[in-house]
Image: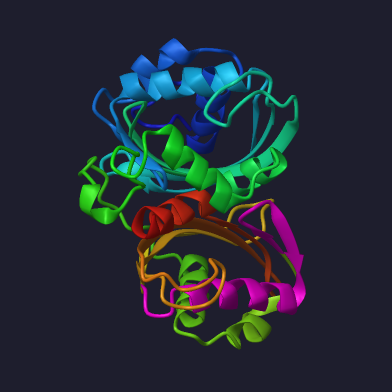
């Protein structure tokens, strides 16, 4: 069945998302961004907000100049929506790339990297018009020999110091890109939303109740955890650092399709002060916004696989801009 409003060569919405990603990045069809991206669309990432496809083209070219052999391996597309309000894809990518040339990550190291990205893209009429993108910067900089805090400090210095440095994304700088959906109300998405809400409400015991005892959890920084103890430690460390931060669910998708485990995609955030010991060291009182996207798959014994993405370097940058 043709995808209404889209080029007939795409058999469904995931095919469109996977296809144009390969066309843009690996087939070097960067100019197609004029066609596939709306002229004024916003791309929000933890490090900044970029407005308009011309600026997206510039950022894409800079990345490919620094990492010319980058591959984007589409692990999953969890989606919802319709042709009128727009489709929303939560597209999880495993990237491989060689740091072959100098760029935003410093002098070329020749190191080969593996890291994940999740992009939430809203589309209609064959065009992306709104986007939220989270890249595992912690994984990238660690593989290049940096600590995320040290990288953030160096980036601030290279951008001209605290007064001139690019501000990480916070809700007050957001713009209305035109997508107003909040998900699809599917029970699998609601199940995952309930788990995250309980964890953020300090009910960490939900891990042993709702996760498979052999769960595999992919965490920021390129870290893989297994089982209840690794999962408990991760969530406890994050929440302890921001104990009174406001947790918000922005978009919740649940999906059951033939050939796939029941799965969910959630875009969420934490906004508040860094006032506890935890993932980000000694409390600083800095105002912090954590922009995050998570995917989950469920099996017969609970949540069996989870992917959690936020940008540690953007959080450290917010803390360092506050503390100097």
* Residue that appears at 74% across and 59% down: 224
Occupied quadrant, residue 140: top right
* Residue that appears at 57% across and 32% down: 105
* Residue that appears at 37% across and 26% down: 126
* Left or right: 214 in relation to 279: right
* Left or right: 152 in relation to 244: right
Magenta region includes residue 279? no
Q: Where is residue 43 in the image (x, y as percent from the top left)?
A: 35, 37
Occupied quadrant, residue 76: top right
The relative height of residue 230 versus residue 71 in the rendered view (above or below) is: below
Out of 16 and 267, give the one closest to the viewer.
267
Q: Which colour scheme is used?
A: rainbow
Out of 229 and 193, give the one closest to the viewer.
229
Q: In which quarter of the image is the C terminus?
A: bottom left
Q: Position of residue 256 (x, y in %)?
A: 57, 58
Question: What residue range appears in magenta?
Answer: 217-245
Q: Position of residue 122 (x, y in %)?
A: 36, 40
Out of 146 and 178, give the one closest to the viewer.
146
The relative height of residue 57 versus residue 80 in the rendered view (above or below) is: above
The relative height of residue 31 versus residue 163 in the rendered view (above or below) is: above
Q: Where is residue 42 in the image (x, y as percent from the top left)?
A: 29, 36
Looking at the image, can residue 84 be seen? yes
Magenta region includes residue 232? yes
Q: How many marks?
A: 0
* Left or right: 159 in relation to 215: left
Out of 309 and 210, give the one closest to the viewer.
309
* Residue that appears at 63% across and 71% down: 234
Looking at the image, can residue 213 be seen? no
């Amino acid at each position: 069945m043709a995808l209404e409003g889209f080029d007939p060569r795409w058999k469904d919405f995931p095919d469109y998302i996977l296809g144009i990603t390969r066309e843009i990045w690996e087939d070097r069809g960067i100019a197609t961004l004029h066609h596939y991206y709306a002229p004024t669309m916003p791309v929000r990432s933890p490090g900044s907000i970029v407005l308009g496809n011309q600026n997206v083209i510039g950022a894409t070219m800079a990345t490919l100049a620094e990492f010319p052999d980058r591959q984007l391996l589409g692990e999953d597309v969890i989606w919802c929506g319709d042709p009128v309000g727009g489709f929303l894809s939560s597209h999880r990518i495993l990237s491989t790339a060689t740091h072959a040339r100098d760029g935003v990550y410093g002098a070329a190291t020749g190191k080969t990297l593996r890291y994940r990205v999740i992009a939430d893209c809203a589309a209609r009429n064959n065009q992306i018009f709104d986007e939220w993108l989270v890249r595992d910067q912690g994984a990238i900089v660690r593989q290049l020999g940096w600590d995320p805090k040290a990288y953030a400090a160096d980036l601030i210095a290279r951008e001209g110091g605290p007064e001139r440095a690019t501000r990480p994304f916070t809700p007050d700088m957001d713009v209305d890109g035109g997508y107003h959906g909040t998900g699809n109300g599917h029970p699998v998405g609601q199940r995952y939303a309930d788990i995250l809400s309980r964890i953020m409400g300090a009910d960490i015991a939900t891990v042993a109740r709702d996760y498979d005892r052999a769960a595999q959890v992919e965490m920021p920084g390129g870290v893989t955890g297994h089982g209840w103890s690794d999962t408990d430690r991760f969530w406890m460390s994050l929440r302890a650092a921001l104990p009174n931060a406001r947790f918000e669910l922005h978009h919740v998708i649940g999906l059951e399709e033939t050939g796939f485990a029941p799965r969910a995609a959630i875009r969420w955030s934490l906004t508040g002060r860094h006032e506890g010991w935890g993932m980000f060291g000694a409390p600083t009182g800095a105002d912090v916004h954590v922009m995050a996207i998570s995917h989950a798959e469920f099996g017969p014994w609970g949540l069996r696989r989870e992917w959690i993405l936020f940008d540690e370097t953007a959080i450290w940058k917010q803390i360092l801009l506050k503390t100097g």
